[in-house]
Amino acid sequence: MEQKERYAESYKITQAIHIGTSEIVIGIDMNAKDNMYYMVADYENNGIFEKYDNALVSDSYTEILSIFTERINNGLAQIKEIEKTFSDKMITADMCDSISGKNLKGEIIVINADELYPEYRTQAYQIVRCTGGNGALANARGSAVFCEYFYKDKHARYERYDVLGILKPEHYPEWLNKRLEVEKVKKKSHKEVER
C-alpha cells in the first residue's frame, strides 16, 4: 500500500520516527520564506485531530538533523525511565478473559502488543482501563474503545479488534495492584468528604 505524502503546512515530511510520547518529523520546503528550508517538529494524531508542535525551522539541514536526533534521544530516555518502574514483559492472551459479547466500560483491558510501536510493547502500555466508546459495548456497530493509562495521566483511542482481552486479576502486576489500592483509598476519602 502506497503511503500518502504528509505535509506540515508547506513542509513535506521526509523523515519520521515514533518514540517516547510523540512522533518526531523532519520536513523540507525548498520554496520556504527567508530560506528556512528545513523544519523539525513533534507530531501527534489521536484519530480525530492531528497537530505539529514544537516546530523549529532553519536554513541548515544539519542543525535540524541535530535537533531531530536530540529529540529521539530524549524519547528513548523517557522509555528507559518507564522501564525502570514497570516490567518489560508483555501480557499474552492466556492471561486474559475473552471480550466476546462483553461490555468493556470500566474493565481493565489489554491492548494487543502487535498493535503498539515496538518501544511500547510492555505492560505499562498494554494495560489500560476502558472508559467508553461504541466499541466498548458488546454488540455495537462502532469499534472505538476509549481508554486511560494507569502509568500516566493520558488517554488513548483503540479499536475493539485491538483489544487482546480483559486482564485476569491473578495476572495483575504488582504496580497495577498498588495503583488500584491508591484509587480505592482516594474514592473512599472523597465519599467521606461528600457526607
Image: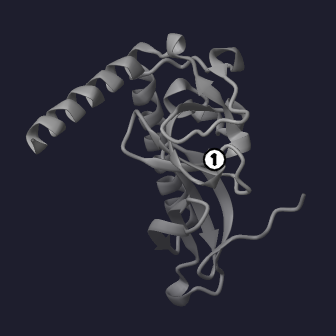
Give how far across and how far down residue 24 sits, in percent: 55, 55
Seen as rendered, the residue at the extreme right is 1
Q: Residue at x 33, y 25 (%)?
A: 179
Assess disc 1: are there few (<14), some (14-19) or many (≥20) residues with their C-alpha within 10 Å of its C-alpha. Answer: some
Asked if residue 69 can be seen in this view, the reply is no
Give 85 or 142, whichever is nearer the viewer.
142
Give 113 or 104, whichever is nearer the viewer.
104
Q: In the picture, residue 32 is in which quadrant?
A: bottom right
Q: Residue at x 56, y 59 (%)?
A: 46
Q: Secondary structure at mark 1?
A: loop
Quarter placement of the N terminus? bottom right
Q: Residue at x 41, y 22 (%)?
A: 176
Q: Total number of numbered labels?
A: 1
Apparent side of residue 20 relative to residue 113 in the rendered image (left or right): left
Q: In the picture, residue 142 is in which quadrant?
A: bottom right
Image height check: is 15 above or below 176? below
Quarter placement of the C terminus? top left
Give how far across and how far down residue 165 sits, in percent: 65, 28
Image height check: is 14 above or below 187? below
Give how far across and how far down residue 173 sits, in percent: 46, 15
Apparent side of residue 142 relative to residue 27 in the rendered image (left or right): right
Q: Amino acid at mark 1?
A: Leu
* Colour convention of the picture: one colour
Give how far across and how far down residue 160 sits, in percent: 69, 44
Seen as rendered, the residue at the extreme top is 170
Seen as rendered, the residue at the extreme front is 195
**Disc 1 target residue:** 137
Q: In the picture, residue 134 is in which quadrant?
A: bottom right
